[in-house]
Amino acid sequence: MTAFASYWQGRLPALIAACLASFPARGARLAVYAYEPLDLPAGVEARDAREICPDPGLMPRYRVDRSE
């Protein structure tokens, strides 16, 4: 099984949730790392972003959309 991972911060829009749901729908494994709980689609694994970056203060500098 192919495995993918992603990071998400903030509100999860319906379009993004639908895109995430397409991974398990096609037989791929998907883990989404976040610092706060997310309402993820069925089949998408929620992971704590602190596992890979313990300091959440480092992540905002890498965001493309800084409007939040």
Image (cartoon, grey):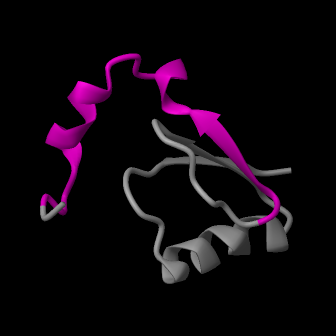
Looking at the picture, does residue 37 appear above or below residue 25?
above
Question: In the image, is 1 to the left or to the right of 56?
Answer: right
Q: Is 64 in the magenta?
A: yes
Q: Is 59 in the magenta?
A: yes
Where is residue 49? Give x, y as percent.
Answer: 49, 31
* Residue 13 visible here: yes
Question: In the image, is 39 to the left or to the right of 60?
Answer: right
Looking at the picture, does residue 22 appear above or below residue 66?
below
Residue furthest top in the image = 54
Q: Nearer the viewer, residue 66 or 27?
A: 66
Residue at coordinates 54% horizontally, 20% vertically from top-left?
A: 51
Specify the quadrant of the image occupied by residue 61: top left
Where is residue 33? Give x, y as percent.
Answer: 54, 40
Specify the quadrant of the image occupied by residue 67: bottom left
Looking at the picture, does residue 53 appear above or below residue 47?
above
Q: Nearer the viewer, residue 24 or 35?
A: 35
Residue at coordinates 18% horizontally, 60% vertically from top-left?
A: 68
* Residue 26 visible here: no
Specify the quadrant of the image occupied by residue 41: bottom right
The span shown in magenta is 42-66
Where is residue 19? Give x, y as percent.
Answer: 59, 76
How many marks do you count on the picture? 0
Residue at coordinates 82% horizontally, 59% vertically from top-left?
A: 43
